Image: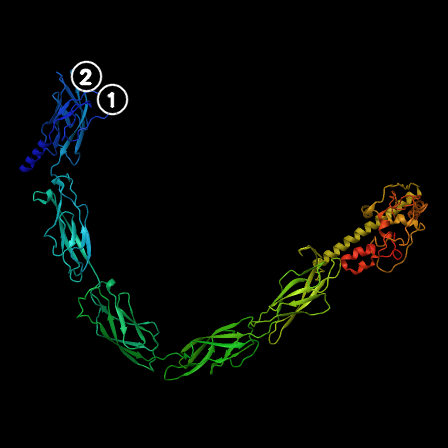
C-alpha cells in the first residue's frame, strides 16, 4: 500500500491552491484549480473587500484519528493585530474546529461513502469581536480509498437456443461498488473463472455481457451450463477487490430430431360392431426433442377404413373411419409412414424408424338389424285413408339372416306398420292444417335373439283444397251521404288455410243491392257504390253478402255478410258522424232484468204524470168556476219577423183568419210532412189583401178554443206576426207570406232529388190546398 499512499499524497499536493476571495471591484478572484470554492450570494446593502487566503482542504477517508489533526489554515490579508476565526456549517465545531490562528482541524475519521463533502462558512473578528471580514464559503472534500468490494445485486440466469451462432448474446451481468466510480477504486472488470464451464461462453470484461463462442450447442447432449462471473475493482489489477456469482444458462430446444416409431410392427383386434370415429389403439413414437417440437405427420398406404390422429402426447391414435363388416373383410394390413419438418439436418437421420406395419384382425359379433336407409320420408294426402304409404326395410347383417319384426315406438301414432313386411298405412285421416308432419321411429327386432335397431320416419301430409276461403276486410267500410256511383268504399282480401296457391274471386251473393264488387285480380277487391246519394235519416241498415271463391280443385266458396256504415263526411271523405247500426243480439238474464226494471220505472213515472195532469185539470176547473181566469192580449207592432221569428213562433195561424176566420181540419190518412210543409199555402193566383176585422175574428176563435179545450193551456200572451193592419192596402209584409204566395215556381220536383233534399221538399213542395196544419 506504500505506492497508494505516495500517489494520494502527490495528488493532494498537486490540487492544493491558494484562494483569494475579493470584491467585484477588481481584486483577485478565485484562483484556477481551487475545488468547490463559492462566494456568498446573500444580498447585502453594501460590499466590503474579501481578503481570505487559505490552502485547499482535503481529508482522506478512514484515516485513524487519535488526536485532531490539521488539514489547512484560514488566512486573511487584513492586517489586524488580534484576530479570531469562527466557522459555521456542516460539521462545524464538532467534526471540524478552528483555533485563533486559523488552523482547521479534523477531530474524527470520515467515510466518503457516508458523506463525500462538507460545506462550511468562515468569519474573521477582531479583538473586540467585531466582524472585519465577511463570510467565505468553502468545501472540505473527503478523498476516496479502496475500502469497498464489488457486489452483485441479484442472481442472473440466461437461456439460448441450441445450434445458435457464435457471438449470440445470452445475458448481461452487472456488479456495483460503493467506492468512487471516477477513480480506479470503483472501476470494475469482469471475467469467467475456471470454477465454471467456460467451454461454450465468454464475457465482455467492460460490459459484463455473456455471449456464445461456439455454434454446436446441442440440448439433447447438454441442456444446461453454469458459468462463474468475477467482478474486480482497481480496473482488474491483482490488488483490486473481487466478487463472484454463478450464472445458469439453459439450452432451449428446437426441432432438430426426427420422430421415430418405437416398434416396426403393430397388431390390433377390432370387433366388427366397433363404432365409427372411436379409438382402436396407439402407435407409440419417440422424439429426442421436447414435446412442443414433436410434430409428427402420418400417412396410411392404400385406401383403408382407418385414420391416424395425433394424441395429446403426440403419439399416433388409430381411429376407425368406416364401419367394419366381418362377413366382407375379416383382416386389414397396411403401412403407416411418419415424417416431420425439422429446421436443421436431423441428428438421428439414420437411426429413426419412420415406417411401421399395422395389422388389424376383425372379430365377428352378432349385430342388430341394419335399415336400408338412415331416414325414411313418405308423402300422404290429407283426408284420405292410405293402405300402402311405403315399406321400411331392415336386414340381419350376420350370415344367420334371422327373422325381423317391425313396430312403431310412439303411442297414438296415426300410422300403422305391418310387423312382418314393414309396410306403413294410415289408421285415420290426416289433417295437414292440424299437423303437417308426423315423425316417429320404427323398431326392427331380430327373432329370437332380441337384437334391435330403430330408424326415424317422416310422414309429410300433402294438402288438398278442403278449406273454404276466409274474407278479410282491409279498410273501414262506410258510405258517405254524397257518395256517387262507382265510389270505392272499402277494400277486401281473403285467406285460405290450404297450402295450395289460391286465386280468389269476389262477387255479391245477391244482385238486388246498391253496391257492386270490382276484382283487382291480385287477391283483393273493392266494394263500390252503384247509385248515390244516401241519407243518415234513412232507417235502413246497409250490408252486403260477399261470396269468395278460391279457384282450387275442387273450388271452395264462402259467403260473408259485411256491414256498411252510413256516415256524414267532409270534403276529404273523412267521416264526421256515422249512423249507429241496429243491434241484433241475444238478451241475457241480467240485461232482461235491467230492461224490466226500466219499464217499471217508466210506468211509475207515467202514472205520476197522469195523476198530476188530473190534479191540474181539477184545479183549472175550480179556477174557472171562481172566475179568476184572465187572458192578456198584447199588441206586438213589429215589422215582419222574418225567418228568425219563424223558428220561434208559428205565425201561419194569424193569417188563417183572412180565409173566413176559421181553421179547416181535414182527415188525411197519408203520413204528414214536417211542420212547415203542413201549413196551408195561399193560392197562387192573387196577392191576398188585408181583411177587415180579421184580427178580431181570430181572437174570438182562440177564446172559443180555450173555453172548450180542457187540456190546452191558456193564452196569457198573444204575439202578432204577419199583420200590417186592417186598413193597409199593402197587406202583410212578412216573408212567410211572400215566400210561398209570391212565387210562381213549383217546388214539387225537389222530392225527386233524393234523401238530401227531403226536408226542402217538405217545406216548399206540398200544395196548400191539400195539407193543413192541425192544432
Q: Residue furthest left?
A: 2
Residue 68, how many percent across, how many down?
A: 10, 27
Residue 427, how many percent across, how many down?
A: 54, 78
Viewer can see residue 710: no
Closer mark to the observer between disc 1 and disc 2: 1
Measure the C-alpha gap from mark 1 to mark 2: 18 Å
Q: Is residue 647 above or below residue 391?
A: above
Q: Residues within 10 Å of mark 2 (few under 14, many from 20)?
A: few
Residue 279, how many percent across, how many down?
A: 31, 71
Q: Is residue 758 above or below residue 329?
A: above
Residue 59, how many percent across, how many down?
A: 12, 31
Q: Is residue 726 left or right of residue 542?
A: right
Is disc 2 placed on a helix, strand or loop? loop
The residue beneath circle 2 is 130
Q: Residue at x 66, y 62 (%)?
A: 488
User: Could you say which quadrant of the image residue 321 lies in?
Assistant: bottom left
Figure quadrant of the N terminus = top left
454 vs 158, nearest the viewer = 158
Q: Residue furthest bottom?
A: 400
Is disc 1 placed on a helix, strand or loop? loop
Q: Residue furthest top?
A: 128
Q: Residues within 10 Å of mark 1 (few under 14, many from 20)?
A: few
Q: Is residue 303 above or below residue 607?
A: below
Viewer can see residue 159: yes
Q: Is residue 486 left or right of residue 501?
A: right
Tag 1 near tag 2, CB within 8 Å: no
The residue beneath circle 1 is 44
Q: Which mark is residue 692?
A: none
Amino acid at each position: 500500500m506504500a505506492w497508494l499512499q505516495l500517489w494520494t499524497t502527490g495528488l493532494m499536493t498537486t490540487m492544493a491552491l491558494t484562494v483569494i476571495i475579493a470584491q467585484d471591484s477588481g481584486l483577485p478572484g478565485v484562483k484556477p484549480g481551487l475545488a468547490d470554492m463559492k462566494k456568498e450570494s446573500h444580498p447585502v446593502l453594501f460590499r466590503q473587500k474579501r481578503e481570505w487566503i487559505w490552502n485547499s482542504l482535503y481529508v482522506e477517508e478512514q484515516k485513524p484519528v487519535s488526536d485532531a489533526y490539521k488539514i489547512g489554515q484560514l488566512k486573511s490579508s487584513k492586517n489586524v493585530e488580534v484576530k479570531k476565526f469562527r466557522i459555521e456549517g456542516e460539521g462545524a465545531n464538532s467534526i471540524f474546529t478552528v483555533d485563533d490562528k486559523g488552523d482547521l482541524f479534523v477531530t474524527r475519521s470520515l467515510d466518503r461513502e457516508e458523506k463525500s463533502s462538507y460545506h462550511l462558512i468562515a468569519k474573521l473578528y477582531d479583538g473586540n469581536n467585531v466582524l472585519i471580514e465577511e463570510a467565505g464559503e468553502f468545501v472540505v472534500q473527503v478523498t476516496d480509498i479502496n475500502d469497498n468490494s464489488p457486489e452483485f445485486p441479484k442472481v442472473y440466469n440466461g437461456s439460448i437456443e441450441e445450434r445458435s451462432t457464435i457471438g449470440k448474446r445470452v445475458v448481461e451481468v452487472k456488479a456495483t461498488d460503493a467506492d468512487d466510480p471516477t477513480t480506479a477504486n470503483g472501476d470494475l472488470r469482469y471475467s469467467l473463472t475456471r470454477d465454471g464451464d467456460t467451454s461454450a461462453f465468454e464475457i465482455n470484461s467492460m460490459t459484463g455481457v455473456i455471449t456464445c463462442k461456439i455454434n454446436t450447442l446441442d440440448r439433447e447432449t447438454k441442456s444446461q451450463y453454469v458459468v462463474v462471473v468475477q467482478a474486480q475493482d482497481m480496473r482488474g489489477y491483482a490488488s483490486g477487490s473481487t466478487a463472484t456469482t454463478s450464472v445458469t444458462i439453459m439450452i432451449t430446444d428446437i426441432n432438430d430430431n426426427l420422430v421415430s416409431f418405437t416398434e416396426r410392427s403393430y397388431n390390433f383386434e377390432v370387433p366388427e360392431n366397433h363404432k365409427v370415429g372411436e379409438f382402436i389403439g396407439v402407435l407409440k413414437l419417440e422424439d429426442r426433442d421436447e414435446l412442443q417440437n414433436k410434430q409428427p405427420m402420418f400417412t396410411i398406404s392404400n385406401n383403408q377404413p382407418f385414420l391416424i390422429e395425433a394424441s395429446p402426447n403426440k403419439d399416433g391414435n388409430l381411429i376407425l373411419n368406416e364401419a367394419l363388416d366381418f362377413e366382407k373383410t375379416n383382416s386389414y394390413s397396411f403401412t403407416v409412414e411418419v415424417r416431420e419438418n425439422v429446421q436443421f439436418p436431423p441428428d438421428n437421420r439414420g437411426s429413426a424408424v419412420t415406417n411401421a406395419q399395422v395389422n388389424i384382425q376383425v372379430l365377428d359379433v352378432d349385430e342388430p338389424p341394419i335399415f336400408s336407409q338412415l331416414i325414411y320420408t313418405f308423402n300422404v294426402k290429407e283426408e284420405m285413408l292410405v293402405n300402402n304409404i311405403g315399406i321400411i326395410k331392415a336386414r340381419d347383417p350376420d350370415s344367420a339372416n334371422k327373422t325381423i319384426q317391425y313396430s312403431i315406438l310412439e303411442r297414438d301414432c296415426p300410422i300403422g306398420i305391418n310387423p312382418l313386411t314393414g309396410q306403413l298405412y294410415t289408421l285415420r285421416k290426416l289433417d295437414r292444417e292440424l299437423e303437417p308432419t308426423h315423425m316417429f321411429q320404427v323398431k326392427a327386432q331380430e327373432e329370437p335373439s332380441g337384437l334391435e335397431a330403430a330408424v326415424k320416419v317422416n310422414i309429410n301430409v300433402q294438402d288438398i283444397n278442403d278449406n273454404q276461403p276466409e274474407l278479410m276486410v282491409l279498410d273501414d267500410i262506410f258510405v258517405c251521404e254524397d257518395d256517387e256511383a262507382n265510389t270505392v268504399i272499402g277494400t277486401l282480401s281473403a285467406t285460405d288455410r290450404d297450402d295450395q296457391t289460391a286465386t280468389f274471386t269476389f262477387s255479391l251473393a245477391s244482385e238486388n243491392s246498391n253496391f257492386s264488387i270490382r276484382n283487382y285480380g291480385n287477391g283483393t277487391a273493392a266494394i263500390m257504390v252503384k247509385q248515390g246519394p244516401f241519407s243518415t235519416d234513412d232507417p235502413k241498415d246497409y250490408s252486403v253478402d260477399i261470396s269468395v271463391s278460391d279457384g282450387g280443385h275442387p273450388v271452395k266458396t264462402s259467403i260473408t255478410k259485411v256491414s256498411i256504415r252510413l256516415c256524414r263526411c267532409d270534403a276529404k271523405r273523412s267521416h264526421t258522424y256515422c249512423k249507429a247500426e241496429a243491434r241484433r243480439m241475444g238478451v241475457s238474464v241480467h240485461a232482461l232484468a235491467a230492461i224490466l226494471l226500466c219499464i217499471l220505472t217508466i210506468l211509475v213515472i207515467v202514472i205520476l204524470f197522469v195523476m198530476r195532469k188530473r190534479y191540474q185539470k181539477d184545479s183549472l176547473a175550480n179556477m174557472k168556476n171562481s172566475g179568476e181566469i184572465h187572458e192578456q192580449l198584447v199588441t206586438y207592432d213589429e215589422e215582419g219577423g222574418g225567418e228568425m221569428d219563424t223558428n220561434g213562433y208559428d205565425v201561419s195561424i194569424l193569417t188563417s183568419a183572412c180565409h173566413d176566420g176559421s181553421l179547416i181540419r181535414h182527415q188525411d190518412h197519408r203520413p204528414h210532412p214536417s211542420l212547415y210543409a203542413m201549413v196551408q199555402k195561399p193560392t197562387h193566383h192573387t196577392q191576398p189583401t188585408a181583411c177587415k176585422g180579421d184580427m178580431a175574428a181570430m181572437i174570438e176563435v182562440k177564446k172559443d178554443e180555450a173555453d172548450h179545450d180542457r187540456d190546452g193551456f191558456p193564452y196569457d200572451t198573444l204575439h202578432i206576426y204577419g199583420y200590417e193592419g186592417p186598413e193597409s192596402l199593402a197587406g202583410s209584409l212578412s216573408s212567410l207570406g211572400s215566400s210561398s204566395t209570391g212565387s210562381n215556381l213549383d217546388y214539387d220536383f225537389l222530392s225527386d232529388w233524393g234523401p238530401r233534399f227531403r226536408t226542402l221538399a217538405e217545406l216548399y213542395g206540398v200544395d196548400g190546398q191539400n195539407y193543413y196544419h192541425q192544432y
